[in-house]
Image (cartoon, grey):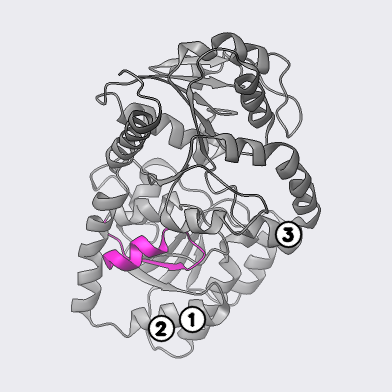
Amino acid sequence: MNILHLVSTLDPQSGGVATAVHSFIIATENEGVKQEVLCLDNPLESYIRNKPYVVHALSPGKSAWKYHKDLLKWITINLQKYDVIIVHGLWQYQSYAIVKAISTSQKTQPLLFTMPHGMLDPYFQQARGRRLKAIRNIFVWHLVEKNLINKSDGLFFTCEQEKILAKETFLGYRPKATFNVGLGIPFPPVYSSTMPSALPDRPYWLFLGRIVPKKGVDLLISAYNRVLSEYVDIPNLVIAGPGLNTPYGRYILQLAKDNPRIHFTGMLTGKAKWGAIYNCELFVLPSHQENFGIAIVEAMACGKPVLISDKVNIWREVVEGGGGLVDTDTGEGVYNMLKRWLNLNQGEKQAISVATTHVFETNFTMERVASRMVTSIKSYSENVYAIKY
């Protein structure tokens, strides 16, 4: 089976979509499939040249829509080389180009699947700071994206909650099939003494991520200050991530300025990041919207309990597996989570810590995700098109 992944960029700094595509391909090396990527990157970039699989990099697209004059032509010419095409992400020119190429082809067409990667979450249409973008998205949905979603042979979702929420965002959402294939990460590096603690010799709770309004850092600091006034001795709070030099970041610093137990480290990578995770007591992320939350899964992979909001789409898996606590993305909800954790005895906390690795290994290893996706494709194709593998 030949699969083509269509994605705007493979640049790892662009975020989770590029990382997910790369990880999926690596994880399916033993699944009997041949995979290539079509993207709009500079072919001379090191992250393109060093890939262990074929990448067709056409050069960067123009504007936020990532228009590229050669994309439609390339897809049209090469369409018959692939059994399956998977489109990753929405709201860019690639959505129009793939639908146009397939709809005008007179030959046997490959199966087409789309993986929205959280981009159909209703949060993006409801958030107060995105009103103009929300209006724009309504027009783009009816002109372009609805065609891709409804003409695809199926949609791949990263978790059950994402699949549920996708139904609520736009009118005319009628996919042919939907699959919860999940999303995964590689196993973390084994802990070593060379991984430094974020706060040596002191217990701490950890937030790790971008310091932006969507992540709910203000809720966390306010709730932490509140529980600190009620309990004699609780762990410190470490906030690790970029964004302190923004207006929101400065607001966060103002919220925390009178509390010496709150510490800001900036962005952590490599051994510093893994050391911060391995040495924390628990991981906290009270986001207003989170499709997957790679840092959450990394924390569980390291055996750390997670406290997350019910707007983090993998909350169901966390609750069902007993890997942490969940509440609303409100000041009261975050406060209640922290207080519930403090009221647990040591045995209950240890049981949650043990459960986290089981939640990770059951739901979020890249090998399991890759196997589910390949199985979904083969099962669908056998039922509908009888493609020979």
Q: In which quarter of the image is residue 98?
A: top right
Q: What element carries label 3?
A: helix
Tell me the distance, in whole angstroms, between the alpha carbons under discs 2 and 1: 6 Å
Q: Residue furthest bottom?
A: 230
Q: Considering only vertical position in the picture, is 382 above or below 291?
A: above
C-beta proximity under 8 Å, tags 2 and 1: yes
Q: What stretch is highlighted in magenta?
A: 303-322
- What's under tag 1, amino acid-wise? Tyr
Image location (x, y in percent) of residue 348: 22, 77
**Nearer the observer, 75 or 102:** 102
Image location (x, y in percent) of residue 292: 46, 52
Which residue is tagged 3? 247
Which residue is tagged 1? 335
Q: Does the magenta-highlighted stretch encompass residue 315? A: yes
C-beta proximity under 8 Å, tags 3 and 1: no
Q: What element carries label 1?
A: helix
- What's under tag 2, amino acid-wise? Lys
Which residue is tagged 2? 339
Q: Is residue 80 visible?
A: yes
Q: Earlier in the sequence, mark 3 or mark 1?
A: 3
- What's under tag 3, amino acid-wise? Pro
**Nearer the observer, 92 or 347:** 92
